[in-house]
Amino acid sequence: MFTQLFGSYLLNKKSITAEQLKYALEYQKNVHLKLGVIAVNSGFMTAESVNQVHSMQCKVDKKFGELAIEMGFLDEEKLNILLNTQKSDYLLLGQALIEKEYMTLEQFGEELNNYKKDYSLNNEKFNSLQNENIDEIIDIFYNFNDSPESSTYKSYLSIFIKNIIRFIDANFKPVEIIPINEYKLQWGVSQEVIGETKLYTYIAADEKSFIDFAGKYAKETYTTNNEYAQAAVGEFLNLVNGLYLVNMSNNDVELELTPQNVLSKVNLKNLSEGFCIPLDFSFGRIDIIIAM
């Protein structure tokens, strides 16, 4: 995710074009290896044990390596070996830009330093971002306009983004969040978190992006917006919200979920403390909507 944010930064500064960024992110996608793939390749884990860890990630909000250790598939030493084997994604971005002569090495280094200055990133924070610390990334880059619900929203968004990366696609471009009071929804699913606190959650998109998002999660190819596609998007939202409830329960806050609803061509109104968080994928844009 840090790579996409840095790429968006370069794009906004007009240091590169949208077409150049698209190529660089595709390059990164082709060479980046997930930890599970490296674990199997190294002989530390079997494909079956990797799948078991992935299944557990549907139930608890933890990183692959952390769960693999807890489940007895890895130890700290082996995990460190795997982590060191992974390449730094932002360096892959730089490598792609330099190889295609979109930027020089000096220009890339200068932009990286400017980025650190603009976001007041010391070495510790920068290292945390490189390690894909999603909580840190969200805390630095997502501004909820001093909303009294900022802490709740950041906690929720962290879980949402982690599961986007795990189950949909890591190569998306975050877009600046938008405060909203109402929203014209074409297609989407909704679910309400109720209890000591209340949270309205939505996944919204145009019809094509909605169908493609469903296919990504279900690992199926949907050509129409049928009940299976709608159920897949609903299941993803329920997965995210279920993990949010587990985290809140661990903090002694008990919450419940209402059933998911499929929505089409409706205007959402009176969204108290409402925000739209857009995510751009290769197949289209998905909007995360949260409100109180």
Image: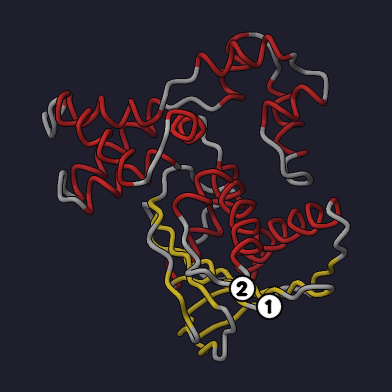
Residue drawn at the location 40% of the way across and 29% of the way down? 89
- Percent across and percent down for residue 58 are 74, 46
CB within 8 Å, label 2 to label 1: yes
Picture coordinates of residue 81, whole percent (x, y): 59, 10
Which colour style is shown? secondary structure
Q: Is residue 54 left or right of residue 129?
A: right
Question: What residue is shown at x 80% (from left), y 75% (from top)?
Answer: 194
- Image quarter for residue 47? top right
**At label 2, which amino acid type do we have?**
Val
In space, the residues marked 2 and 1 are separated at their CA atoms by: 5 Å
Check the image and report above or below for 282 versus 124. below
Q: Residues within 10 Å of mark 1 (few under 14, many from 20)?
A: some
Name the residue nearer the viewer: 239 or 230.
Answer: 239
> In this figure, which residue is indicated by the disc labeled 2?
189
**Nearer to the camera, 270 or 257:** 270
* Amino acid type, residue under disc 1 in the picture: Asn
**Residue drawn at the location 65% of the way across and 59% of the way down:** 156
Q: Residue at x 68, y 78 (%)?
A: 261
**Disc with the residue nearer the chain's start (2 vs 1):** 2
Q: Secondary structure at mark 2?
A: strand
Q: Work out which quarter of the rendered image holds the C terminus and state it.
A: bottom right
What is the quadrant of residue 249 in the picture?
bottom right
* Secondary structure of residue under mark 1: strand
**Does residue 67 sit above or below 217 in this rendering?**
above
Q: According to the image, label 1 marks what residue?
A: 261
The quadrant the N terminus occupies is: top left
How many C-alpha atoms fall within 10 Å of the one at disc 2: few (<14), some, or many (≥20)? many
